[in-house]
Image (cartoon, rainbow, N blue to C red):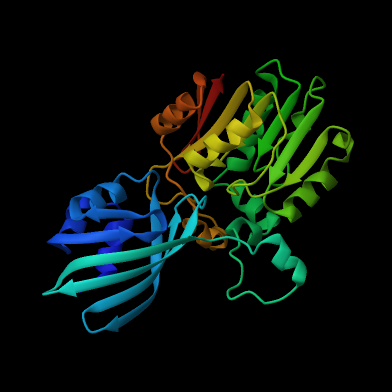
Amino acid sequence: MNLTAYWKATLQQNADEMRKFFHKDAYINWHNTNEHFTVEEFIRANCEYPGSWNGEIERIEQCHDLYITVTHVFATDKTSSFHVTSFIRCEAGFITSIDEYWGDDGSAPQWRMEQNIGTSIHPAWQNPWTKIDLSDYENHMKWESVMQLQAMNEMMKEQFRAYPVHTIMILGIAGGNGLEHTPSNINKIYGVDINPAYLAQCAKRYTHLESVLECVCTDLTSENITLPYADMVVANLLIEYIGYRCFQTVIAKVDPLYVSCIIQSNTDDNFVSDSPYLHVFDNLHAIHHPMQETELIIAMKESGYALITKKEQPLPNGKKLVQLDFKK
């Protein structure tokens, strides 16, 4: 039994491939939710499960015709993570039954952390953006064949002045590129980023905005974040790294009147443009989500926002920045 191939088909929610592994009279039990499935019911439940999923088998044990797998299953936008223990019984190369036990991944409860007992089994996962130096990021972005830092600076100038707003939330603010264009009618800017070093440098650069700029260090993919209200959310080259669904959740929490997004339109498979700093971004593949204008527009429509403006900014390497503005 090729369990790696089975789990690949399952995580990809590929019904036709999954079906090849089962005996026609097989059954599947999900004990946590007290559900018993036929093969076709199980395939439907798996393949119609909301979201996009990935994972890896962490352990396999075999006892005669019984295989036991421990698999880490997680949403590709990092909003959910589980470990599942599967008891898979096979006969003549086909699965005849599966008994599964699922558990949510998460931190230890507060009462146990307060006891200060135990240690971590594995190092905590860190978002790749927390490991990229700001100078490397900015030097790459302003490289002559990239020119995104310069282009977004001009585009942000327009974003700030486009709508009658007084509070703005900038998601993925990094070092604060464009804040020098803050107009006088803006009385609060929430600068949100996952990298505390970026925010520290941002605050240092824009001391004249001390009464206006409030830096917020948070992971937007976390389920338990709280965010303040803002009249407008600006998300430039940010949605690519949290995904549509997570972005919808963030927008629902902030509840802005306007949303202004910039996404990158790629001419090839490389979402990071070439420069001497290219390999600094190697680990971003783990959290990158391909972006499509139409899919973003659909996601925003589902959240109650209509497209009101679209602009394009060509880049030297053939890529382009696409600005999409929405209003509730």
Number of labels in the image equals 0
Q: Say whether residue 20 is left or right of residue 34.
A: left
Q: Residue furthest bottom?
A: 64
| 150 to the left or right of 248 | right
Residue 2 visible in rendering: no
Q: Is residue 119 above or below residue 268?
A: below
**Residue 58 appears at what percent x and percent y?**
41, 73
How far across and how far down the image is residue 294, in percent? 39, 29
Q: Residue at x 40, y 64 (%)?
A: 101
Question: Left or right of 13: which side holds 251?
Answer: right
For the point 61% across and 72% down, the residue is: 123
- Work out which quarter of the rendered image holds the N terminus and state it: bottom left
Whether 95 is drawn above or below 310: the answer is below
Provide residue 264's location: percent of width, then percent of height. 49, 39
Residue at point 40%, 53% (across, down): 33
Q: Based on the displayed image, in which of its 4 quarters is residue 39 positioned?
A: bottom left
The spot of residue 144 in percent (x, y) is 58, 47
Q: Which image quadrant: the C terminus?
A: top right
